[in-house]
Image: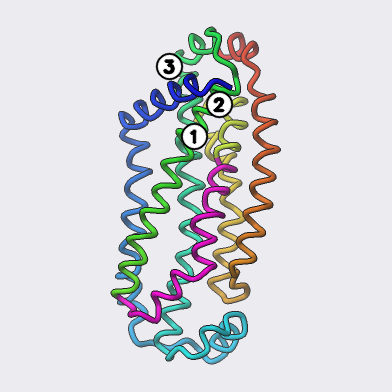
C-alpha cells in the first residue's frame, strides 16, 4: 500500500466533506448538544435522590459510589448515561461520511474515473475509511473534554472523578474508535451493494442497535459496565472490524462497479 496515494485520497475526501453542508451539520451539531447536556440535566436532577431500590442496585454494581451523598449519587447515575453517547458519535458520523463518500461518487459519476487509474482498491478504501473515521473520533474526544469540564463545574469535584474514571477513559478513547471503525466497515460493505445513501445508512445503522441496548440497560441500572467490560467489547469489535475490512475489499469489485453502476 502506497502511503502517498492514501494521503491524496484522504485530502480529497476531507475537501469534499467540508463542502458538504449536510455532512458538516452531522459532525458539528450533535457534539454541541451533547456538550451542554450536563447543564440541562442538572436542572432536571437538582437535589433529587434516587429511589431506594435503585440506589441499592446502583451501589451494588458501583461500590466506589457508596460514599456519595444522595444528590451526588443521583448526579453520578445521570451523568453515567452520557457515556453511551460518546460511543454513538464515532458510530453515526463515520457511517454518514462513508456512505455519502462512496455512493455520492457513484451518483455523481466521479468514482469510475478514479477506479480507472492504477490506484489499488485497498488504497482507495483506506483513504476513504480514514477520512470517515477521524472526524467522528475527534468529535467524540473534543466533546468529551468539554463535557468533563462542564460536568465538574455543574456537579462538583465528586462527579469529576466519575466522568474521568477508567470506564470512561476506556469507553471514550478505546471502545469509541473501534466502534467507529466497525461503522466505517459497515458503510463500505453496504455502499458497495446499494446506490441510495439513505438505504446504506439504514442498513449500516444496525451497528447502533447494540449501543442503544446498552443505553437501556444502563438507564435502568440493570447493567453498569466497567472498564474491563468496555475493554472486552473493544477487543471483540476490533477483531470483527478487521474481518469486515477484508470482506469489504473483496466485495468492492472495481470491475463490476465500472459496469454495474453506470
104 w.r.t. 172: above or below: above
Q: Which residue is denoted by mark 1 in the rendering?
A: 130
Q: Is residue 94 magenta?
A: no
User: Closer to the N terminus: mark 3 or mark 2?
Assistant: 3
- Residue labelled with disc 3: 108
> Residue 221, labelled with which disc?
none
Identify the residue at image location x=49%, y=12%: 114
Q: CA distance from mark 1 to mark 2?
A: 8 Å
Q: Earlier in the sequence, mark 1 or mark 3?
A: 3
State left or right for residue 174 relative to residue 135.
right
Q: How many marks?
A: 3
Which residue lies under the disc numbered 2?
125
Helix, strand or loop for disc 1: helix
Quarter holding residue 126: top right
Main secondary-structure element of the magenta-colored stretch:
helix
Q: Which residues are magenta?
A: 154-183
> Which residue is at the front of the view, 170 or 100?
170
Rounded to the nearest angstrom, the CA distance separating label 1 from label 3 is 22 Å
Rate crowding at label 1 as few (under 14), some (14 to 19) or many (20 or more) other CA atoms within 10 Å. many
> Which residue is found at the position 45% from the left and 47% from the top?
137
Picture layout, residue 8 above or below residue 213: above
| Vertical order, 117 against 81 (above or below) | above
- In the image, taking residue 218 as reference, residue 154 lies left or right, namely left
**Residue 159 included in the magenta stretch of the image:** yes
Residue drawn at the location 32% of the way across and 49% of the way down: 29
Position of residue 243 measured from the top left corner of the image (x, y, whole percent)? 70, 38
Residue ID at (56%, 44%): 205
Residue neighbourhood size for the residue with mark 2, other residues' Cα within 10 Å, grouped as few (<14), some (14–19), many (≥20): many
State which mark lies toward you, 1 or 3. Answer: 1
The N terminus: image quadrant:
top right
Amino acid at each position: 500500500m502506497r502511503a502517498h496515494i492514501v494521503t491524496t485520497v484522504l485530502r480529497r475526501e476531507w475537501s469534499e466533506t467540508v463542502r458538504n453542508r449536510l455532512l458538516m451539520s452531522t459532525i458539528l451539531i450533535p457534539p454541541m448538544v451533547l456538550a451542554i447536556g450536563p447543564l440541562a440535566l442538572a436542572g432536571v436532577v437538582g437535589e433529587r435522590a434516587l429511589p431506594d431500590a435503585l440506589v441499592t442496585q446502583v451501589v451494588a454494581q458501583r461500590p466506589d459510589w457508596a460514599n456519595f451523598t444522595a444528590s451526588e449519587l443521583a448526579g453520578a447515575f445521570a451523568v453515567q448515561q452520557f457515556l453511551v453517547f460518546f460511543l454513538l458519535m464515532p458510530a453515526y458520523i463515520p457511517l454518514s461520511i462513508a456512505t455519502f463518500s462512496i455512493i455520492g461518487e457513484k451518483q455523481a459519476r466521479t468514482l469510475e474515473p478514479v477506479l480507472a487509474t492504477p490506484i489499488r482498491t485497498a488504497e482507495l478504501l483506506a483513504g476513504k475509511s480514514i477520512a470517515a473515521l477521524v472526524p467522528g473520533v475527534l468529535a467524540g474526544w473534543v466533546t468529551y473534554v468539554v463535557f468533563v469540564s462542564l460536568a465538574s463545574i455543574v456537579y462538583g469535584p465528586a462527579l469529576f472523578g466519575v466522568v474521568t474514571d477508567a470506564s470512561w477513559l476506556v469507553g471514550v478513547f478505546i471502545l469509541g474508535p473501534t466502534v467507529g471503525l466497525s461503522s466505517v466497515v459497515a458503510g463500505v460493505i453496504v455502499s458497495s451493494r446499494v446506490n441510495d445513501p439513505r438505504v446504506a445508512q439504514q442498513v449500516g445503522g444496525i451497528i447502533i442497535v447494540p449501543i442503544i441496548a446498552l443505553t437501556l440497560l444502563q438507564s435502568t441500572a440493570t447493567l453498569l459496565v466497567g472498564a474491563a467490560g468496555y475493554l472486552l467489547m473493544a477487543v471483540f469489535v476490533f477483531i470483527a472490524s478487521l474481518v469486515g475490512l477484508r470482506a469489504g475489499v473483496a466485495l468492492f469489485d472495481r470491475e463490476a462497479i465500472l459496469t454495474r453502476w453506470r
